Image (spheres, rainbow, N blue to C red):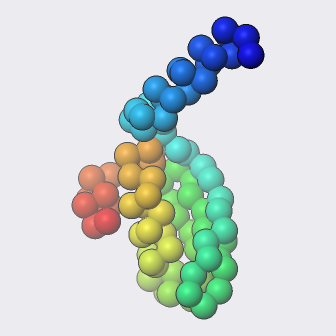
Amino acid sequence: MSSSYIGKVDKARKYAEEPDRVNIHTFEASFVGNHNTYRVGYHDGDWRCECAFFATRRVCSHTMALQRMLDEMLSGQNEAEQAAV
């Protein structure tokens, strides 16, 4: 293994410990819930989920769980939204 590769691995480890370096603007994921698997997405501060609860309330346990998991990496999320999680 080359020394340059080892340096990149060390740098990646350091970056992984500093999540404030990352701002997520867009992503899509499959979320395995208790009753089904749902496609959940995020784009510049707006969430979407295929579950029926989200369709009527624009929030659900799947989006709230992802907000907790991704916390400070979400771009465009205001403090009130973060406090709700």
Left or right of 70 in this view: 50: right
Task: Kindly identify the residue that appears in the image at 42 percent across and 69 percent down.
Answer: 64
x then y, percent, for residue 61? 45, 78
| Residue farthest front in this picture | 1
Task: Kindly identify the residue that appears in the image at 69 percent across and 16 percent down.
Answer: 5
Task: Kindly identify the residue that appears in the image at 60 percent across and 49 percent down.
Answer: 26
Quadrant position of residue 34: bottom right
Task: Kindly identify the residue that appears in the image at 32 percent across and 52 percent down.
Answer: 78
How many dots with numbers?
Answer: 0
Note whether 18 is above or below 80 in the view shown: above
Note whether 64 is above or below 23 in the view shown: below
Note whether 63 is above or below 8 in the view shown: below
Residue 71 visible in rendering? yes
> Considering depth in this image, is 25 or 35 the residue closer to the camera?
35
Left or right of 76 in this view: 7: right
x then y, percent, for residue 24? 53, 44
